[in-house]
Image (spheres, rainbow, N blue to C red):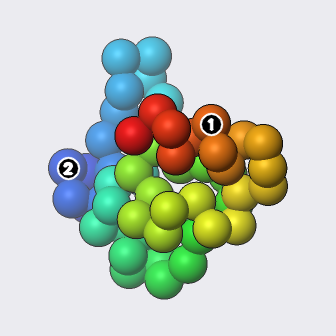
Amino acid sequence: MIEGKDFYYNEDGYIVFTEHYHLTKGFCCGNGCTHCPYNYEAVPEPKKSELINKK
């Protein structure tokens, strides 16, 4: 993994995966990731709707 391409560190020091990383992975993991390019398809309701409305 390459910092800046696949992930970055947020202000709290946590790793945040980029859209590039998720596209390379090939599917939604269901965790509600910030840069999910799959429209949160594997995230259960009601969290899925909440995340989509935030975008």
The kind of residue tagged 1 is Glu
Name the element at disc 1: helix
| Residue in view at x 45 percent, y 16 percent | 12
**Circle 2: is it few (<14), some (14-19), or many (20+) Cα within 10 Å?**
few
Q: CA distance from mark 2 to mark 1?
A: 27 Å
Residue 10's place in the image compared with 15, above or below, is above
| Closest to the observer, 44 or 2 | 44
Q: How many marks?
A: 2
The x and y percentages for residue 1 are 34, 65
Q: Quadrant of the C terminus?
A: top left
The kind of residue tagged 2 is Gly
Please say whether residue 16 is visible from this viewpoint: no
- Which of the two marks, 2 or 1, is nearer to us in this view? 1
12 on left or right of 19? right
| Closest to the observer, 19 or 16 | 19
| Residue in view at x 51 percent, y 38 percent | 53
| Residue behind mark 1 | 50
30 on left or right of 8? right
The x and y percentages for residue 4 are 20, 50
Of label 2 and label 1, which has the lower sequence position? 2
| Residue behind mark 2 | 4
